[in-house]
Amino acid sequence: MIVQIEIPDGVIDLPGYSKADLMLDIAVALYQRKIYSLAKAARFAGLNRLEFQKVLSERQISIHYDLQTDLETLKHF
């Protein structure tokens, strides 16, 4: 599914603010709201997981951990 959003001229016409910045801000918001996982938010922003984690760290946003999921993952090792 492709969703297109129309943004009026001038709304993001800020010096030094690009489409990539907007995509990153959206990805961070989706991650913060627990709508996207870390991996999915990173992919949305066009970053790998470590790059996205660095962005979260710079913005002082905690990584979400799910104990049950982590325990299930550990069973496979």
Image (cartoon, grey):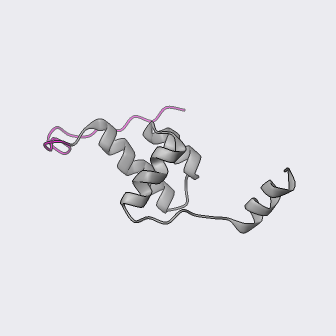
- Residue furthest to the top in view is 2
Residue drawn at point x = 37 percent, y = 42 percent: 23
Q: Which residues are magenta?
A: 1-16
Which of the 4 quarters of the picture holds residue 20? top left
Residue drawn at point x = 25 percent, y = 38 percent: 18
Horizontal side of residue 14 vs 65, given as left or right: left
Where does the N terminus fall, quadrant-wise? top right
Would you say residue 5 sits in the magenta stretch? yes
Q: Position of residue 56 (x, y in %)?
A: 43, 57
Q: Position of residue 31 (x, y in %)?
A: 50, 56
Which of the 4 quarters of the picture holds residue 68? bottom right
Q: Position of residue 67 (x, y in %)?
A: 72, 67
Residue drawn at point x = 20 percent, y = 43 percent: 12
**Which residue is more in the foreground, 58 or 17?**
58
**Which residue is more in the foreground, 7 or 43?**
43
Would you say residue 6 sits in the magenta stretch? yes
Q: Position of residue 19 (x, y in %)?
A: 29, 37
From this view, report whether residue 47 is shown above or below residue 26.
Answer: above
**Magenta span: chief secondary structure:** loop
Horizontal side of residue 58 vs 74, given as left or right: left
Question: Total label count?
Answer: 0
From this view, report whether residue 56 is shown above or below residue 68.
Answer: above
Horizontal side of residue 14 vs 63, given as left or right: left
